[in-house]
Structures are given as C-alpha cells and as structure tokens.
Amino acid sequence: EAGVTQFPSHSVIEKGQTVTLRCDPISGHDNLYWYRRVMGKEIKFLLHFVKESKQDESGMPNNRFLAERTGGTYSTLKVQPAELEDSGVYFCASSPAGHIITDTQYFGPGTRLTVL
Amino acid sequence: AQSVTQLGSHVSVSEGALVLLRCNYSSSVPPYLFWYVQYPNQGLQLLLKYTSAATLVKGINGFEAEFKKSETSFHLTKPSAHMSDAAEYFCAVRSYSGGGADGLTFGKGTHLIIQP
C-alpha cells in the first residue's frame, strides 16, 4: 500500500509569487490534515478535511493560504502571494474514517518551501 | 488549550545505553498522547500512542512510554540505544475539545544522537 505522497519535495520561490503544494493521502482515507513546521519551531496544525469538507481550519495563518480537496481525494495548498515567513516544511497526513482523536495519522515526507 | 514540552532539543547517548526522551503535556481534558519519529528525508512515523488503556505503552523498535497523570508526563524510553535510532523524535497530544476534532499539538522535537 502506497503511503502519503507530497509534491514537490522542494520549492524555491520569490516573495510575491504563488506556489501550490499537493498531497495524495493513502487511498480510502477520509481524513486529511495539513501541518507546517517553521525552522526552529514546532510542527503546527493548519487544517483538517473530512472527505472534501473542511472540518477545522483554525490553524490557517491568513487568507493568503487556500486549501482544497476536490472529490475527497488529493488536496492542494496554495500560497498566494508568498511571504518570507511562509518558508518552512509543509506536512500532509491522512487517517481512515473512524475515531479521529485516537486514530494514527500517517504523514508524508513533507514539502520544503523556501521563499526568497 | 493544550501544549507539549519536550525537554532538550538534543540528547546524546552512547550505543547500548538507556534512551530517555522527556515529554510533559498540558491539557484541560483527558489527553491522548503520541510519539512520532522522523528519520532524515522521511515523513513522521508513529512509534506508539496512549489512548487511555494501559498506562505503559509499548511501541515499535523496542521503545516504550509511560503515561503518568500525576506528573503530566509521557516520557519515551528504550533500554539499549542502536545507531539506527538516531533521528528526531516528536511528542504530540490530542484531546476532544467538544468543538470538533483538532489536529495534533506537537512539541518542538528532540534530536537523538547516538555515540559509537
């Protein structure tokens, strides 16, 4: 069974540009999460999808970030326009339908975003 | 609100020595606790989790952790370190706040260094 995949693995863009990150969860997983780790800081929750619906987006930093999950399969996270403070590693995780609080979240390898 | 504190950003032990990585949590409701490990260029992998069953939890690769409510701790241990244990370790907490399922709240991570 394939794990969570993320694309690209690295992205270097200039301030003001747009970047779109993609996450493909484990097949059949209804829950999809985005997290971000800024250098030197802890991994922080951004948002949670259940199928195609946003269940909790309380961690999204501002309206420059837009997440979508059309059809309840893969998800994209767009940053527009990117700022320097958006640099970091963006992780995606997925888990099956069930007891959300205790279920294991399976993480992808992350996308390292550098904004110059 | 919930939080996690991992004592020590770097822990160095000799091969064959005891590994002890400390984690303290703060949560106003009963917590569920997780330890994840990240090897270089890989995603986070679940080591073990506490979900209110046994307080001593055994995980993969010989790791275990004990939930101590009185100390609000969930320290990770392994009797004998191997070179392959060198990685970054994350403690995380999750609890049902009643307002929906939030994501995991992570500590800042601890780099485990194994000395030959």
Image (cartoon, coloured by chain):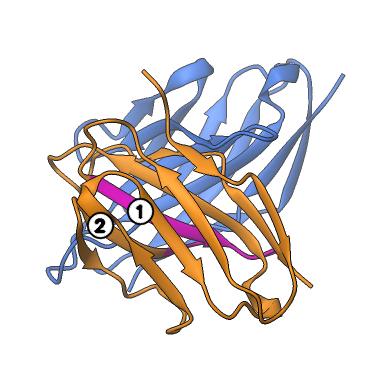
Q: Is residue A31 left or right of residue B44?
A: left
10 Å crowding of disc 2: few (<14), some (14-19), many (20+): many
Query: Of helix, strand and loop, which one carries label 2?
Result: strand
Q: Nearer the viewer, residue A49 or B15?
A: A49
Q: Residue A69: x, y in percent?
A: 29, 56
Q: Could you tell me which residue is drawn at 18 percent across and 67 percent down?
A: B97
What residue did someone put label 1 on? A33
Residue A56 location, quadrant:
bottom left
**Residue B71, visible in the rendered structure:** no
Chain B's colour is: blue
Which of the numbered marks, if any, corresponds to residue B28?
none
10 Å crowding of disc 1: few (<14), some (14-19), many (20+): many
Q: Are marks 2 and 1 in contact (CB under 8 Å)?
A: yes
- C-alpha distance separating marks 2 and 1: 6 Å
Give the residues in magenta. A31-45
Q: Could you tell me which residue is drawn at 60 percent across and 50 percent down?
A: A111
What residue did someone put label 2 on? A49
Q: Is residue A88 above or below residue A16?
A: above
Chain A's colour is: orange
Q: Could you tell me which residue is drawn at 67 percent across and 82 percent down?
A: A16
Q: Main secondary structure of the magenta part?
A: strand
Q: Residue A74: x, y in percent?
A: 34, 46
Please name the amino acid that badge 2 sits on: Phe
